[in-house]
Amino acid sequence: GAVVSQHPSRVICKSGTSVKIECRSLDFQATTMFWYRQFPKKSLMLMATSNEGSKATYEQGVEKDKFLINHASLTLSTLTVTSAHPEDSSFYICSASQGLENTGELFFGEGSRLTVL
Amino acid sequence: DAKTTQPPSMDCAEGRAANLPCNHSTISGNEYVYWYRQIHSQGPQYIIHGLKNNETNEMASLIITEDRKSSTLILPHATLRDTAVYYCIVRVVGFQKLVFGTGTRLLVSP
């Protein structure tokens, strides 16, 4: 199957700093990417949908100024957690779609674990 | 998207078949049934999907009832590496995002 890569896989930062997480589709062009976050022992929660070249669409309750999403190319989307605080500590996962109108599967990255001290 | 209901946890002995049920009684005619799994601290992995016919691939089989209100994922010979949380998701054709429920935590034991 297609490969989606995230970087970094783990990051620790101080409270108040910003952290950028990259999501790359390695062998296909992803017209749409999705960002999820997951707390321990909980399910994945969809944060936002990003389409290449346009603004991201955020799910209800997700602060768009806190979680900046950029999808500048067909193979790269970035999530920036701005002014991070300990409550932002979580497992962040991206997924990518080839934009098929049919039943195409979504491919997921390995996840990025953010710890804010 | 229609909601799904899955048992929170199941156990299976290594080498035996694991049958994971899912109820999706409000599924619409244009919604597919998808199964993903998530091994601890990894991203979800696609397993299989189907519309109304039973499907089989190298990982699993998907059995969908005739009225499409429920389905069963079958891992024919479970191994320890199949221990994971299994998510059953219904998704509208052409609607790309996946909304995850709580899933079933499958524990495969020796």
Image: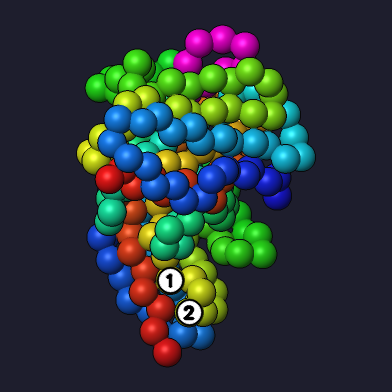
The quadrant of the rendering that contains the C terminus of chain A is top left
Where on the picture, by quarter, is residue B109?
A: bottom left
Q: Residue furthest bottom?
A: B110
Residue underneath mark 2: B80
**Residue contact between numbered discs 1 and 2, judged by CB atoms under 8 Å:** yes
Residue A8, position as x, y percentages in the image: 54, 45
Q: Secondary structure at mark 1?
A: loop
Residue A1, position as x, y percentages in the image: 70, 49
Q: Which residues are magenta?
A: A49-56
Q: Give yes or no for residue A50 being in the magenta stretch.
A: yes
**Main SS of the magenta segment?**
loop
Is A92 rendered above or below residue A80? below
Q: Are marks 1 and 2 on the same chain?
A: yes
Q: Kindly identify the amino acid type of the residue bearing the numbered disc 2.
A: Leu
Q: Nearer the viewer, residue A37 or A104?
A: A37
Q: Kindly identify the amino acid type of the residue bearing the numbered disc 1.
A: Thr
Residue underneath mark 1: B83
Q: Nearer the viewer, residue A1 or A100?
A: A1
Where on the picture, by quarter, is residue B11?
A: bottom left
Residue A109, position as x, y percentages in the image: 56, 45
What residue do we see at 68% from left, 46% from top?
Answer: A3
In the drawing, does residue A40 fall left or right of residue B27? left
In the drawing, does residue B77 fall left or right of residue A82? right
What residue do we see at 62% from left, 44% from top?
Answer: A5
Q: Is residue B82 visible in the rendered structure shown here?
A: yes
What residue do we see at 28% from left, 66% from top?
Answer: B9
